[in-house]
Image (cartoon, rainbow, N blue to C red):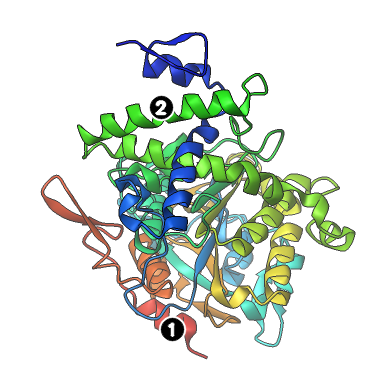
Amino acid sequence: MKSTCCHRHETVVTRREALVRSGSGLGAAALGFLLARDQARAAGDAQALPATAINSLAPKQPHFAPRAKCVISLFMQGGPSQMDTFDPKPELQKLNGKPLPDSFQSADLKLQFMSAAGGTLMGSPFAFQKRGQSGLEVSDLFPNVAAFADDLAVIRSCYHESFIHGPALSLMHSGNLLLGHPSVGSWVVSGLGCESDNLPAFMVMTDGVIRGSSSAYSSGFLPAVYQGTLIRTEGAAIQNLSPPPQITRAEQRTLIDQIGRWNQSHLAARPDDTNLAARIANYELAFRMQAAAPDLIDLAQETQAVRELYGVDKEPTARFGRMCLLARRMVERGVRFIELYSNDWDGHGDCPGNHRGNADKTDKPIAALLADLKQRGLLDSTLVLWAGEFGRTPVMQGNKGRDHNPYGFAAWLAGGGVRGGKAIGATDELGFRAVDDKVHAHDLHATMLTLLGLNHEKLTYLFEGRQRRLTDVGGQNNLAERLTRA
């Protein structure tokens, strides 16, 4: 169906064609909506607002008083070795180069690329030191992060069921081994909304490739508005944000008005289409971001001392340092969930060399993030999580490598009400299995939600006839009380 615009000397043919013509300026498609909303607000007429004026990302009340308001997830993709980072194993050091004892060889100890049976033990080449007043032991891989030992609560007994990257990543991000389930960031945003009107509630950055692509920050079966937004760390941070220069503001207004009418009509006939509803909401958000996003990513606003703290101007810390600094700026602007990916901790061939290179890139920026949040008074309300999809084996793979190990690995938390300077749980004397105070991925998710003021058993969504949740049918949140206890 054709319609003729009175302000232009051409015929607009279809909604699809109009969208194509708007080119890289999709964000400006919210202009008509915003003007109508502002006019309605000025007139004091709430009823004049269209149904889509309801903001799905508006702040929501938690189930109970929260300790944390937002999350920064530092995800070490590939699987960092627990016995080389935050879980010292003196017995493993003593047995370095010797065969794995018979008592550790069992049929259920499956590995990805090798057999544990007959394997040779490999101690860590990195020394552990007692750090801070607490005496928490941290590897020499992280001399800068170690300075914050009294702020870290290290969980040395994490575990789950998959020794394969894909399912393990899915489990650590969505609580499920299968794809198609919402990520933890999407669950958090669905439960709490966002405190920023101008930026996405859930933002993701990476210094490489994310295995499984967008599945790691997908909204799954939740409404699409809760999915994560990937921010580039090089070049244009957000693609397709600037309005096309060849379209005047008057022409853009005409185009937006027509697109708005089409979209509203289309949505009215499809009220359950969350992708369409999210797309309309994204037009508004994109328009707002045209002003907010350039301000967010303008690191020239930061002092030279802050830039040096994060290492944004020197290698090898430049890229991850920029990510950490942007994460702090996002927290200041009300973003709810931020995830930073470091690639790639998959140390099959040369685990010490792999980990040294990755630690050189991330240690200083992560320490800077903790210091910066702390001195700005933001760490108390920001939960920082460091983890990977699994750990590594104490037995050697090849010459100096370590295979995948989901049976026992380490993670740490800081801020968000967490009392640091403590280690919770333990693996066996070689670091193969979690044996004391075991913390499953579901328990970790339940703990995060609890610290955010959300009951993991009540944060549900009806899908395929069942009330689904991040923690599936598991999850214990008693860890939260231990983490926050002095």
Query: In which image quadrant can residue 479 be found?
Result: bottom left
Q: CA distance from mark 1 to mark 2?
A: 53 Å
- Give the mark count: 2
Q: Position of residue 9 (x, y in %)?
A: 52, 9
Q: Secondary structure at mark 2?
A: helix
Q: Is residue 157 above or below residue 151?
A: above
The answer to whether one can see residue 24 in this image is no
Where does label 1 land, which residue? 482
* Residue at position x 43%, y 83% in the image: 482
Report the side of 395 relative to 477 (left or right). right
* Residue at position x 35%, y 68% in the image: 446
Q: Which mark is residue 387?
A: none
* Residue at position x 27%, y 34% in the image: 267
Q: Nearer the viewer, mark 1 or mark 2?
A: 2
Query: In which image quadrant can residue 61 be found?
Result: bottom left
Where does label 2 land, which residue? 259
Q: Which image quarter is the N terminus in?
A: top left
Q: Position of residue 90 (x, y in %)?
A: 61, 71
**Dot 1 crowding, Cα within 10 Å, few <14, some 14–19, many 20+:** some
Report the side of 128 relative to 308 (left or right). left
